Amino acid sequence: MSKNEIKLKKGFGILKNYPIPLHKNDFKLQAILVYALSRIEGAIEKYNSPEAKSLFKDKIDEAFVFEFYKNLKEDLKRLVPAFDDLERFILSLKNKPNATAIETLAFRQCVPLVRSYNVIVIECEKHFKENTLWIPDLVAISLINFWFTEYAKLTTVYASIVAKYNFQNILDRYNKIAIENKKIGVECHIKKMYDIVSEIVLNLDKAPSKNKKRN
């Protein structure tokens, strides 16, 4: 953990174990990391399934990627909550007239995170249609990598992630898959994914992140 992160204040309620974002870019990166946690957990679960079909021809590359994912998942779980937990918490408070002060503060901290998360999900649903090849974990890793590339200097809360992990190592292994499967169109799909990720990041950057007061 970096020196910056050791000094960070923690949130309230459901967010009490996680660092508080310092500005709008941290809120949005926080949403990307929540999205990534969900997709990486899904990829690991699929990888461990006996019925799983792999894109990797090189088993060494495959083992490297999923070891990377397992380590990253544990670090993400220390930095951000699972989206399902956030959603349940917000729904439980929406119509609760006697919320405690701590619950209300936690609610206000959750709203911009969920708003940014939903921007990512809506953008993915818009671009990745049913029956088209898309790789959720690759999209997640690409989002983190692209965001850090564009906004790394503005990020202090999650500095340890970019310091510890070389996300380009994962992208390089998927680029190898793209080249190996060029004839069946995988290269085209993966390139399109990268283009979509850059668009998602730009739209996320433009999206409002200001808290709204809870009535």
Image (cartoon, helix red, strand yellow):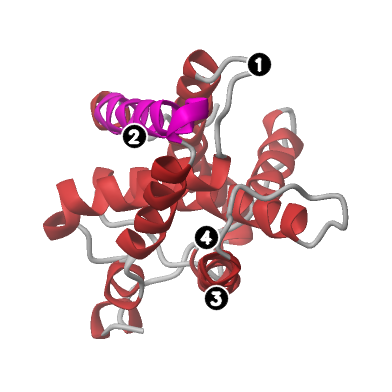
Look at the numbered disc 4 and give the secondary structure of its residue. Answer: loop
Amino acid at pointer 2: Tyr
Mark before the other along the chain sequence, 2 or 1: 1
Mark 3 and mark 4: Cα distance apart in space: 15 Å
The label nearer to you, 1 versus 3, is 1
- Cβ atoms at labels 4 and 1 below 8 Å apart: no
Is 160 magenta? The answer is no
Mark before the other along the chain sequence, 1 or 3: 3
The label nearer to you, 3 versus 4, is 3
Quarter holding the C terminus is top right
Look at the numbered disc 1 and give the secondary structure of its residue. Answer: loop
Confirm whether residue 105 shows in the render. Answer: no
The label nearer to you, 4 versus 2, is 2
- Residue 69 at x, y = what percent? 55, 66
Mark before the other along the chain sequence, 3 or 4: 3
Which range is magenta? Answer: 182-203
Q: Which residue is mark 4?
A: 80
Q: Which residue is mark 3?
A: 71
Quarter-of-image position of residue 210: top left
Confirm whether residue 34 shows in the render. Answer: yes
The label nearer to you, 2 versus 3, is 2
